[in-house]
Amino acid sequence: NAGVTQTPKFQVLKTGQSMTLQCAQDMNHNSMYWYRQDPGMGLRLIYYSASEGTTDKGEVPNGYNVSRLNKREFSLRLESAAPSQTSVYFCASHFNRAGLDEQYFGPGTRLTVT
Amino acid sequence: KNEVEQSPQNLTAQEGEFITINCSYSVGISALHWLQQHPGGGIVSLFMLSSGKKKHGRLIATINIQEKHSSLHITASHPRDSAVYICAVNLPGNAGKSTFGDGTTLTVKP
């Protein structure tokens, strides 16, 4: 199992450019999440997908869109990047069954918007 | 006020010391997670708790549901334990969404 994978690991964008962050998990988890982490702040939920075909806004969804392409993949798109979106982005998947409740995180994407 | 409060915010210890990091939360939860994040690194889930106590190697996590409080203990601390430790809670029926504390930065000096 590769767990949760993210691409790219690093990205620099100019203001106004667009890009898609890719996330995939091979653990057959139903739930997937996109978080951002900023210095001095905790992880904040951008969007989540409780199951294939569904997506919902989290705490800080403005400026982002998501797509749950299939059970494995959950992508995050920045249509017009802004410097305020400079952050580290983490994708995660969640497993909850028979008393087990586990989260697995991807390695993160470090995004800089100039 | 954050629903999840961690203390201390920063902690420096000497190698070998016993370390305690605390997490308090203000809502009913279905589960609490302790996560570890090394500098520049990814996030690893250490424990999931819904009651009682769990132990893994030198790490021990406890939770008191009535008091809405959890602690993470590290015995015989080592410099490689230096990391940010994050407490996260899942609310019941909330599709596994977590609310995170701001983290405790632990530095263990040799």
Image (cartoon, coloured by chain):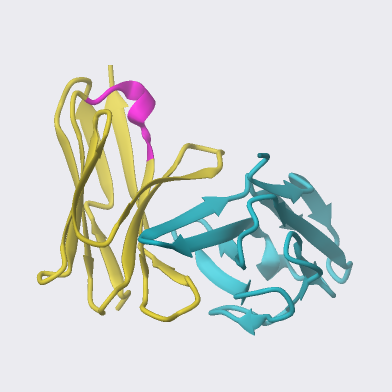
Chain colours: A cyan, B yellow
Q: Nearer the viewer, residue B74 or B105?
A: B74
- Residue B77, horizontal then vertical, whole percent: 24, 26
Q: Which residues are magenta?
A: B77-83
Which residue is at 84% across, 75% downward? A79
Quarter of the figure that contains the N terminus of chain B? bottom left
Asked if the magenta segment contains residue B80, the reply would be: yes
A44 is higher (above) or lower (below) than B83: below
* Position of residue B70 in the picture relative to residue A110 (left or right): left
Farthest residue, direction right: A17
B20 to A75, vertically: above or below: above
- The outermost residue toward the front is A98
Q: In percent of the image, x 36 and y 79: which residue is there?
A: B92
Q: Is residue A114 visible?
A: no
Q: Nearer the viewer, residue A16 or A22?
A: A22
Q: How far across and how far down the image is residue A111, in percent?
A: 72, 54
Q: Residue furthest top?
A: B110
- Quick check: can you spot residue B102? yes
